[in-house]
Image: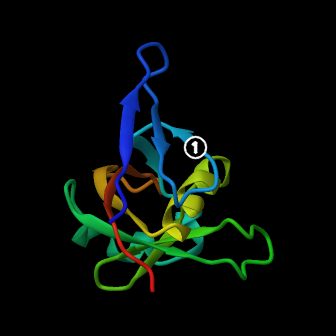
């Protein structure tokens, strides 16, 4: 069984994740508050009235994305695509997901006068054993 060791650095409020199955330790904030990028290009506006703070979202890797091989799509639990994780932060989360870690995603806030912003929180879930 794989064990995850999480140690909190006092100054930067980052967590160091070390695991023998991960090629190198990753440093990233957990939990991380961010937003869904590209909502204007997908169905986010059409379904925003059905979304609320606390709703869970799903992440899917999209390694065939021609613009970003580290792309992570963001979906509702009903499989409606809302957009992507921002490019600037996605690589460490791709590495975690590739190693079998579940990255939990929930909505923090949606602007009532729709401007495209969906704020989300990412946190580390359990390790899923890969066969």
* Image quadrant containing the N terminus: bottom left
Q: Is residue 33 left or right of residue 96?
A: left
Q: In this view, does 59 lie to the left or right of 104?
A: right
Q: Residue at x 79, y 70 (%)?
A: 67
126 or 72: which is nearer to us?
A: 126
**Residue 102: quarter of image:** bottom left
Query: x, y percentage for residue 24?
Result: 63, 48
93 or 73: which is nearer to us?
A: 93
Residue lying farthest to the right in this orientation: 66
Q: Is residue 11 left or right of residue 64?
A: left
Q: Where is 118 relative to 12, above or below?
A: below
111 or 58: which is nearer to us?
A: 58
Q: Can residue 68 be seen in this view?
A: yes
Q: Is residue 61 left or right of residue 30?
A: right
Q: Name the residue carrying label 1.
A: 25
Query: x, y percentage for residue 77?
Result: 29, 79
Query: x, y percentage for residue 115?
Result: 46, 53
Q: Which residue is drawn at 22% across and 63% down?
A: 55
Quick one: label 1, few (<14), some, or many (20+) residues within 10 Å? few
Query: x, y percentage for residue 33?
Result: 40, 41
Q: What kind of element bears circle 1?
A: loop
């Amino acid at each position: 069984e794989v064990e995850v060791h999480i140690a909190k650095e006092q100054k930067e409020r980052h967590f160091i994740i070390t695991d023998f199955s991960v090629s190198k330790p990753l440093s990233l904030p957990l939990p991380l508050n961010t937003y869904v990028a590209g909502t204007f290009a997908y169905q986010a506006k059409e379904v925003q009235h059905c979304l609320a703070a606390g709703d869970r979202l799903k992440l899917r890797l999209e390694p065939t994305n021609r613009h970003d091989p580290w792309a992570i799509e963001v979906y509702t639990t009903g499989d409606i695509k809302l957009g992507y994780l921002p490019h600037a932060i996605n690589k460490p989360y791709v590495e975690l997901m590739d190693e079998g870690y579940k990255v939990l995603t929930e909505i923090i806030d949606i602007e009532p006068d729709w401007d495209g912003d969906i704020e989300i929180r990412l946190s580390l879930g359990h390790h899923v054993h890969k066969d």
